[in-house]
Image (spheres, grey):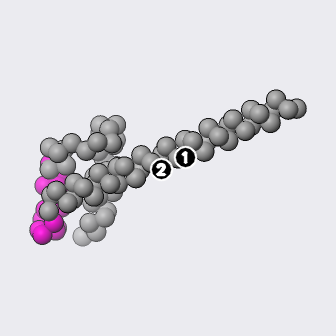
């Protein structure tokens, strides 16, 4: 049986892939919760709490992607500045 965190990551990845959005849709997460067996595997797990965990994962992934993009842009700009000096 997958861990709850595995379900959270799977939901976040699938939601982002399907929608391209980082703001979680309530209907989508409710369907995921039921269709993927989270409800059966973790009967005491609250849907609202699960949705909050998935939203947190989506936000965390978005922040990581933004940080990576800033680092890549900074690296590219430093490369351009170095080329100009030559």
Q: Residue furthest right?
A: 86
Q: Is residue 10 visible?
A: no
Query: Which residue does the image show at 29% across and 51% down from the upper left?
Result: 55
Tell me if 59 is positioned left or right of 49 in this view: right
Query: Which residue does the image show at 54% across and 46% down from the upper left?
Result: 68
Residue 71 screen position, x and y as percent: 60, 45
Please tell me whether mark 2 sits on a helix, a strand or a loop.
Answer: helix
Question: CB under 8 Å between callouts 1 and 2?
Answer: yes
Q: Which residue is mark 2?
A: 64
* Residue stretch in magenta: 31-45
Answer with the quarter of the image where residue 42 lies: bottom left
Of residues 24 and 10, which is closer to you in this image?
Answer: 24
Query: Which residue does the image show at 40% across and 53% down from the upper left?
Result: 60
Q: Which residue is mark 1?
A: 68
Number of other residues with Cα within 10 Å of mark 1, as a class: few under 14, some 14 to 19, many 20 or more: few
Q: Is residue 29 visible?
A: yes
Residue 56 screen position, x and y as percent: 32, 54
């Amino acid at each position: 049986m997958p861990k709850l965190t595995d379900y959270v990551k799977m939901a976040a990845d699938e939601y982002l892939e399907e929608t391209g959005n980082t703001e979680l849709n309530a209907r989508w997460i409710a369907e995921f919760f039921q269709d993927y067996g989270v409800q059966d595997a973790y009967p005491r797990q609250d849907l609202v709490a699960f949705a909050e965990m998935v939203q947190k994962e989506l936000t965390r992934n978005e922040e990581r992607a933004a940080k990576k993009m800033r680092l890549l842009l900074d690296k590219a700009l430093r490369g351009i500045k170095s080329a100009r000096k030559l």
